[in-house]
Image (cartoon, rainbow, N blue to C red):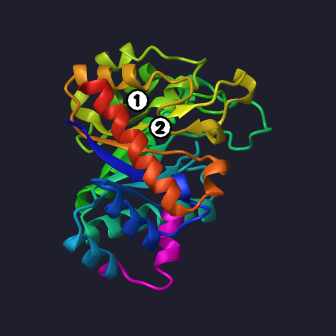
Amino acid sequence: MMTISYNEACAKNCSTLEKDLELTEKAGFDWIEIRLDMLREYLKKHTLDDLKAFFSTSRIKPHAFNAIYLYPEFLSDHDDEAKRDALLDEFLLCCIAGKAIGSHYIIIVPPLQRNPAGGPYVGSWDDTYANCVRILRELSDFALPYDMKLCFELVGFNRSSVRSIERADAIVRAVDRDNVGFVFDSYNIYLNGGLNDFSALKKVQAEKIFAVHLMSGDDVPEEEMGQDKRCFCGSGVVDTAAFLKTLDSIGYKGMVSVETFRPEYWEKTPEWVIENAYRTTAEAVKSALS
């Protein structure tokens, strides 16, 4: 049976890493995905040794750090030095923290046009392919001594440079490194034109699926779709059962992490968010796979 993970985005504006650790263990989660902004806030008052000590006695364990957002010029001859150093600092934090606490995964997001009002991503597929392959190979080498794996995540809306399972698969195959694979997100797949057909997952290298994000989303026109429309399983328009059954059919038995960015949830208490995140995700997995 797949195991259940919590992504800190669910309550990021109403909780802290300290609180999330306490509540996710209490709720019954197997894993937690740590947000880098929440980790940095935690480290203002605590150390990585404190975090290591927590996990050494806790049933809940750390999974992926979220997230590193690529841009096309990263690590190229045309890179901006300050921008490069800031992103490398984020990446190095993931590697050092992962080594300390026993986490082995980093979520890597392809280049995006990040302004919701800024229109579609501008750039050719050929350039995106070449840049992502180049960057992932360099980051793979950097991560190797820390025993870290890179989880490449397609994002389905038109502000993303990599929108489909097929294109993410082409990049990961070209990179061809043991520590570079996928995280597949049910809503990010759906964002590509309201897609509820997950059969393309059957063509990827199943052993390269390092993580899975599971949630549904509101039924809104395509022009209104966005990460703020994510919702817990049990409602919404994403066929989460089909998503899970497809993953099960190719032998995936890893973690399933609930990840929402819903402002409505951030107005609740962390207790409400985490209890409902666990309940709805566990019910969805059990219902789809039992």
Name the residue carrying label 2: 132
Disc with the residue nearer the chain's start (1 vs 2): 2
Q: Tell me how far mark 1 sits from mark 2, CA to CA.
A: 7 Å
Q: Amino acid at mark 1?
A: Ile
Q: Is residue 6 visible?
A: yes
Residue 111 vs residue 239: left or right?
right
Residue 169, image x, y percentages: 38, 25
Cβ–Cβ under 8 Å for marks 1 and 2:
yes
Residue 171, disc: 1
Q: Main secondary structure of the magenta part?
A: helix
Q: Residue at x 45, y 37 (%)?
A: 153
Q: Residue furthest bottom?
A: 45
User: 178 or 288: which is nearer to us?
Assistant: 288
How many numbered dots are placed on residues in this image?
2
Q: Is residue 188 left or right of residue 98?
A: right
**Mark number, residue 112:** none
Highlighted magenta segment, given as a residue range: 36-49
Instruction: Residue at 23%, 26% (x, y): give it.
Output: 290
Q: Quadrant of residue 20?
A: bottom left
Q: Position of residue 141 (x, y in %)?
A: 30, 52
Q: Is residue 120 magenta?
A: no
Picture residue at 24% right of the left edge, 61% below the top: 145
Circle 1 Cα neighbour tier, 10 Å, few/some/many (<14 / 14–19 / ≥20): many
Taking the spot 23% from the left edge, 68% from the top edge, the residue there is 58
Per the image, label 2 sits on a secondary structure element best described as: helix
